[in-house]
Image: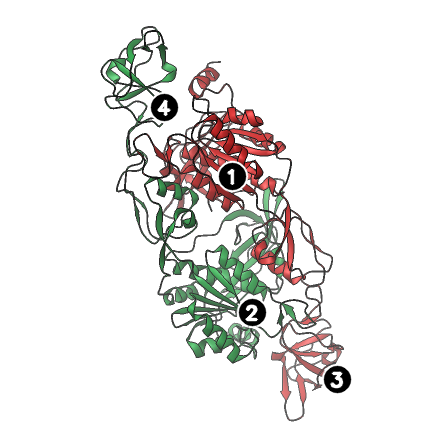
Chain colours: A red, B green
Amino acid sequence: MDGADSDRKRSGFRSRTAVEKAQKTLREAVSRTVESTRVGLEAADGRVLAEPILAARDVPHYERAAMDGYAVRARDTFGASERSPEVVQVGEGRVDPGTAVRVHTGSEVPGGADAVVMIEHVEALEATGELEVKDAVAEGENVAPAGEDVSEGARLYDPGHRLRPSDLGLLRSVGLEEVAVRERPTVGVIPTGEELVETDPDPGEVIETNGLTVSRMVQRWGGQATYRDIVTDDFDALRVAIERDLTRDVVVTTGGSSVGQRDLLPEVIDDLGEVLVHGVALKPGHPVCLGIVEETPVLALPGYPVACIVNAVQFLRPVLRWLEGTEPESHPTVEARLERKIPSEPGTRTFARVALEDRDGECVAVPTRASGSGVLSSVALADGWVIVEESREGIPEGERVRVENWEA
Amino acid sequence: MDGADSDRKRSGFRSRTAVEKAQKTLREAVSRTVESTRVGLEAADGRVLAEPILAARDVPHYERAAMDGYAVRARDTFGASERSPEVVQVGEGRVDPGTAVRVHTGSEVPGGADAVVMIEHVEALEATGELEVKDAVAEGENVAPAGEDVSEGARLYDPGHRLRPSDLGLLRSVGLEEVAVRERPTVGVIPTGEELVETDPDPGEVIETNGLTVSRMVQRWGGQATYRDIVTDDFDALRVAIERDLTRDVVVTTGGSSVGQRDLLPEVIDDLGEVLVHGVALKPGHPVCLGIVEETPVLALPGYPVACIVNAVQFLRPVLRWLEGTEPESHPTVEARLERKIPSEPGTRTFARVALEDRDGECVAVPTRASGSGVLSSVALADGWVIVEESREGIPEGERVRVENWEA
């Protein structure tokens, strides 16, 4: 076919794997999860539960007043009204018939009482120690039963749940002080390329940025990145660098993942282990190589900064989730009107950077550049991404699109 | 008026300030920003820029090949085609008329050359050192000019921008190794209430959870929380606790913020400084008290867990943003169909917890409890919040609503 032929000429890839198929292949290869560890509640924020959480007790663990007022026996108030109050004696401790005990919101309802009269509906007669009750209450009124919030034995969370601040409050309220969570997956991030330098580039040299960006993304995604020194395009040097990081849960390289003379990563991965996927039908960033070495996923991301980010989000982020025993959450999205056409080729999933603008109260997505995967500023100055599915040939101007924020 | 009267009776507040007015009052009182500090790029992730960023140089800083191939003078290729190739001599260094030099994507275009012929369109004749060029290129073709990504002097970011991983790559590529960012605002978090205990509650006692939750929210919002020991409902003890934390950028208390006998915080804040707002027209959580002491915002949040969270999100989060010299971002939202009516009173902004469920591909928001601000599990087990504006009386079943995720 002409299409496939010109495709090969252009990219050097005989065929490209669809994004979802590549993800599925990778999913099947990630067979393990990271270890779990018990940590205190503060340290558990943002971590993934490794155990189910059952409530070890009722919350609240006692019957409490839901209002400020007086605990009473409801029947002692029956018939009470503003004009014809019932009178009871103020006491302490237990509520006997004809008596009332002062309670505050949240305090225990004393034995004998079965309701609370709101403070607004009584008048205390200091001289006699009597209390005029001006409104009747029903049994149970203004009383919160034990277990109202959480009943003992209730299943609160399943393993795989990522803990949030409000979860921590609930965990503590059921008596937990620590929980089993997944370790944060460790990731070796290895920037590669003989053109790369740390600073002060000469002509032909490029400052390393992919490793920096990917390392920080790993941290945000709950992993622990080790940002390695630059490795040049040398088979043995690359091999040694990857082997050293096989003690980690994931190895990620940037650059050298395509099919050119200096693209050695696929060959190195093949030598050390297995290449699962080389070349994915996505744009920008098709020359990605996904492999596995001794159970460790090794992801060779392309060196073009935008292609590197697209692939990190599509493949590395899910791997971290799977290692934690959970699934990737969807990204925060906003709806917007597309300001101008996004072109794409059918059969390729296309990721287009857009800036969001408010135009008279309408949210408009403006593609930042028509193309150019090497153009870092188009990502850094964008607000999100619009995805063109494989089945479509571009998205026309004016269509309502969903814009994903990958760095929220 | 009956409404106001019964309102006062119920809540003890003569009047309640509208949420937006309370936020505006607080905004005006937060007159300072935190100091700035210079940090390395890795440490700058998630921090707010305190300076504008201008590109100190072009990126790329040299003219580079956009394709693998040969750098040539375009005119030497004019008329070339598959059938009738133009022949040039392969050289090294400078490209003189009639010569070509091998280049890789991203490498410098040698002096003399003004275009790059793709590797696919040439044939090298090893024996003679000649190169057949089978396609003509125009001047500038496959050459990326210096400054294509970023031009020297371009304003990349304004102060107030919160840095993301992709921003760090761009900053480094323009030669920056550190940037001025705002310090993370420091927050003293003081849980108060004589009923509170750390663990093992007796009847009438409650495990402290608000301070824990608020502390973790502060950390997620970019602040530095100090989670203090519980302070009992004692005027002097509360006064001392707040005074001690006035060295911080914000002081937050939980509990004791209403108008009851044991609600001492408003009085303590009034004694130390100024109460700006006491009582806000929001639900759950109207008994909040916002004050300022010696330029330090002091926020007394209600003790009911849900009310505490609602107020922290409405008032504490913006204060942290203002201190950093920026504005609060909107929360990630999803659209959903409301499964059943959310009731609310006109004039009060109501925050309803909902769980999100997928029903045959449709996203449905299910209110987790009709009411009860003390019910922590309704937050922890919810996925987000639906806001009923003051102008409305509830939201009817079936309406499309926006669900805010406050803990993304």
Residue A390 x %, y %: 51, 28
Q: Quadrant of residue A338?
A: top left
Secondary element at tag 2: loop
Relative height, residue A264 to residue B345 (above, below):
above
Q: Nearer the viewer, mark 2 or mark 3?
A: 2
**Do marks 2 and 4 both belong to one polypeptide chain?**
yes
Identify the residue under disc 2. Answer: B229
* Amino acid at pointer 1: Gly
Q: CA distance from mark 2 to mark 3?
A: 41 Å
**Do marks 2 and 1 both belong to one polypeptide chain?**
no
Relative height, residue B92 to residue A26 (above, below):
above
Other residues around mark 2 within 10 Å, as few (<14) / some (14–19) / many (≥20): some
Relative height, residue A151 to residue A252 (above, below):
below
Q: Is residue A323 left or right of residue A383?
A: right
Secondary element at tag 4: loop
Q: Residue at x 53, y 37 (%)?
A: A316
* Amino acid at pointer 3: Gly
- Report in which chain the residue with disc 3 lies: A
Q: Are marks 2 and 4 in contact (CB under 8 Å)?
A: no
Identify the residue under disc 1. Answer: A188
- Report in which chain the residue with disc 4 lies: B
**Do marks 1 and 4 both belong to one polypeptide chain?**
no
Which numbered disc, 2 or 4, marks the residue that appears first in the sequence? 4
Q: Is residue A213 left or right of residue B371?
A: left
* Amino acid at pointer 4: His
Q: CA distance from mark 2 to mark 1?
A: 40 Å
Identify the residue under disc 4. Answer: B104
Q: Nearer the viewer, mark 1 or mark 4?
A: 1
Identify the residue under disc 3. Answer: A98
